[in-house]
Amino acid sequence: MPQMPAVLANTLMPWFAKPSQVTHVEALAPRLKRVRFEGTSLRGVVHEPGHEVEFRVSATEFRHYTPSLLDAQHGAMEVVFYLHGQGPGSAWAQGLKAGDAVDILGPGGRLAVDPDADAHLFLGDETCLGLFQAMVRALPSPLRLSGAVEVEPGCEDWVEKVGVSLTAVARAPGQARGEALSAWLAGNVRGDATCYLAGHAGSIVRLRQELLERHGFDKRALRSKAYWADGKRGL
Ligand SMILES: Cc1cc2nc3c(=O)[nH]c(=O)nc-3n(C[C@H](O)[C@H](O)[C@H](O)COP(=O)(O)OP(=O)(O)OC[C@H]3O[C@@H](n4cnc5c(N)ncnc54)[C@H](O)[C@@H]3O)c2cc1C
């Protein structure tokens, strides 16, 4: 739920949220930040790589993010935030610093690695760097893995900075979102893979159609999760 009256949020948060503290902040790039949260409330949480959490980013607004790491044994979680600069979630993440108290809702969700897949294909944008890192770590074997992350021009080193073994493709100025991924896909498709699509909603629709109609994928081999949509506040 992206929005809730402050009075209701104040009442519900103590019941449902897991209290934590920011213990480490890493500026990977000016618009990319990794934050570590720790708390006893995170110990023993049941979680699968690909699941999401929710943060209260203002008195009335909530936004979803994805743990790039969740260590339930030690009560620690990391999130990679893309600071797009156009909403309260991005502003809240930008301001996070060591020592801040942060309440966490979740984790939960349905997106997860397909344990039976012969190969794995990842397609997404800057918001998916943490997701893909968590999912790639969870693969039974890293050998049959490929994929691309569409990034702002000049940010091709972000995949390496985060530590994701995927290809970065730059979105040329003026180019529609998803076009760079589509071009990469045309030369790198592998029909035996389970394909994970995340990030920009419009790009997911386009890539999904191409995978089904042009590249002969079966619907059951596609797993997707829209993370944001043009002009929409919070998904
Ligand atoms: C399940 C889930 C998991 C997610 N995990 C992550 C994560 O791990 N890391 C991460 O960085 N993001 C993640 N996101 C995406 C993030 O929640 C959205 O980008 C969200 O819109 C940010 O909130 P906001 O308040 O900054 O912007 P909003 O108030 O939601 O939107 C304001 C404006 O900004 C635009 N906008 C939103 N996101 C972007 C963007 N990425 N690029 C350009 N314009 C944008 C919107 O279209 C809108 O016009 C996740 C989303 C979901 C649903």
Image: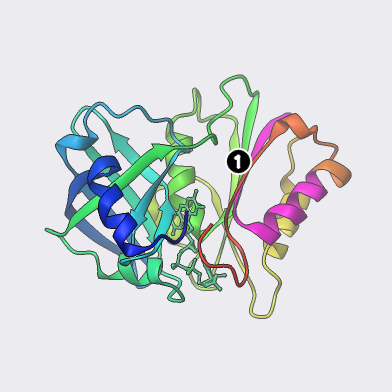
Closer to us: 81 or 151: 81
Q: Which residue is mark 1?
A: 146
In the image, residue 32 lies at what x, y percent? 38, 65
In the image, residue 202 lies at what x, y percent? 70, 61
36 lies above or below 93: above
Residue pushed farthest left? 99
Residue 89 horizontal side relative to residue 118, left or right: left
* Residue type at numbered disc 1: Ser
Residue 37 horizontal side relative to residue 89, left or right: left
Query: How many circles with numbers are drawn on the protein?
Result: 1
How dense is the environment of label 1, judged by Cα within 10 Å: few (below 14), some, or many (20 and up)?
A: many
Residue 96 horizontal side relative to residue 178, left or right: left
Report if residue 205 lies within the magenta region.
yes
Closer to us: 198 or 117: 198
Q: Which quadrant of the figure has residue 24?
A: bottom left
Residue pushed farthest top? 116
- Which contiguous range is marked in magenta? 192-211
Residue 65 horizontal side relative to residue 142, left or right: left
Could one spot residue 164 in this view of the protein?
A: no
